[in-house]
Image (cartoon, helix red, strand yellow):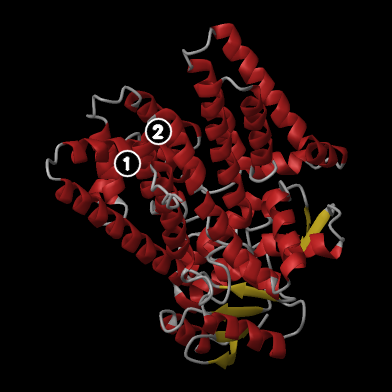
Amino acid sequence: MTAPRKPRFTSKTASALVLSLLLVLGLYARCFMCWTSPLPFGDGGLFFKMIEALIRHKFALPAYVNYNGEAIPFAYPPFGIYAAAFLHALFGGSILGVMKIVPAVVSTFSILPVYGIGKETLGEKEALLAATFFAFYTPGYNWVVMGGGVTRAWGYFWALMALFAYFRYRNTRSNHWLLATGAFAGLTGLSHPGTVFWLALMLGTIMLADATFPFRKRIVVLLETGAVGLLTLSPWAVTIISRKQMPALLNALHTGHSNWYAGAVVLFPWGIKLILTPWVDSWSGAFSLVGLWNEKYPQRWWLAGALLFTFVAAPRAATRFAAVWIALLAAIGTELALRSIKSKKAAFGLIVVVGLYLSLSASIATLNLARLSVLPQQVAGMDWANQHLKTGASILVLPQREGWGNNYLGEWMPALTNFRVACLPQGTEWTGEFEKRVQAAKTLWQASRGGAKGLRTWLERAPCKPQFVWLADLPEQALLVNSLADDEHFHLLYADKHNAFFAIVH
């Protein structure tokens, strides 16, 4: 009788173990602060109301969602909203709990298509290195793990899956991978409008420039992929077109930070910005630059081109979309460094040190992200308002920091309470008042620096007429609290170590 054969430890087993470890550490880096934060990181108030509306309508797509006292057209790509609503219905718990964990989990699983892209374009070892860099590259996921990540995370995941499927098709010539490419592209469009715009430009350029196919074949591949993608998202597209909500969606796509497209002139951010800054991702930028000198890989030039193209085509979220190309370049940069080290122990030590540094720095970045979110004492301020102020009142939430997009407390308050936040820009991307609200928010920040007098002047000219003022960033705003308390136009209702509420005397 022969002894049973011992299972062999193959390279596939090793890759599976490494990927499993990356998924565990990547999820920890993204999510270890999720449950200590009272609300999802950063933004997400409008998405919270969308999920509520979807559940209330028994998963039929509503025509509008009520947010901050306004009827907002429900024209947003609904995949992430449906996914959150189904998970809430399936597992119970709170919607906020789903919004905390799902973006981090989906973002973590995005590591897998990056590994797949690396394997199809570079090789197994390089794919594992790229997956490692991507797992802990914070610009690739910091906006994705926020509350708004219930849509952004899915959009980026499906976009990466579409890229992987195309490269797989390119190597296997199997038509089902071409079909998958189009389907994943369609799912991207069903998840996030900005991401599908980048994917369409990126994937279309890659297909047309792919010299492995004759030019006529490239055109056919592009048209077939586009047709499958359009077919995938057609049920939703037909719905919003029939409701005449397409103008609202297009209007929303043209709104946002005024300096988004200034990023287009920064054509070498992975080298200049990330290396010179003391931020946590500098090693990814450094190794990606080293990759340009690795002559073993002619692919480095199209990777660099894809990186530059991302900053030109989609500067609004270029750091996120460029993460996959930075990770691939960093992988071949690391390969060059490892090849130059003669000792296997030294090479292994380099991998361990880089991996530990990236994991630790990503965790620190998540900790800093949590600090920018709504704090427990600010949630307590909402509770006080619910108990003592008139339902439906208009409250001016003074900005916690400069920039309308950073006023997360103002964004969450109308989602979690029955109050309206005066001059809030969020949500008005769909109603045509966005630019006016953004301008009002900018002037509010400047006026609040001038104390009670500056705030009075702003209120006289503002397009909104709030009844109350809430300062929720004490003791940093203590001087402004004292100024309002000494002014007869403001009546102090409540103050503690963290919050102060004033009634506006008209």
Nearer the observer, 218 or 306 = 218
Residue 494 lies in quadrant? bottom right
| Residue placed most toward the observer, 157 or 17 | 17
Quadrant of res 381: bottom right
Closer to the camera in the image, 284 or 388: 284
Q: Are marks 1 and 2 in contact (CB under 8 Å)?
A: yes
Counting from the top left corner in percent of width and height, residue 331 is at 32, 39
Question: What's the amino acid at mark 1?
Answer: Trp
Which residue is at 43% across, 44% downward? 319
Residue type at the position of mark 2:
Leu
Residue under numbered circle 2: 307
Residue 226 drawn at (x, y percent):
67, 25
SS class, disc 1 = loop
Question: Alpha-carbon neighbours of circle 2 within 10 Å: few (<14), some, or many (≥20)?
Answer: many
Specify the quadrant that holds the C terminus.
bottom right
Residue 62 or residue 232, whichever sits in front: 232
Q: Is residue 459 visible?
A: no
- For the residues labelled 1 and 2, the Cα–Cα distance comes to 9 Å
Residue 365, horizontal then vertical, whole percent? 38, 62
For residue 451, above or below residue 330: below
Badge 1 or badge 2: first in the primary sequence: 1
Q: Residues within 10 Å of mark 1 (few under 14, many from 20)?
A: many
Picture disc at residue 49: none
Local secondary structure at mark 2: helix
For residue 137, side relative to residue 414 (left or right): left
Tag 1 residue: 270
Measured along the vertical axis of the image, is residue 307 above or below residue 192? above
Residue at the image point whose x is 57% and y is 32% from the top:
165
Image point (29%, 59%), residue name: 356
* 201 left or right, relative to 82: left
Residue 411 is situated, as x and y percent measured from the top left of the image, at: 62, 66
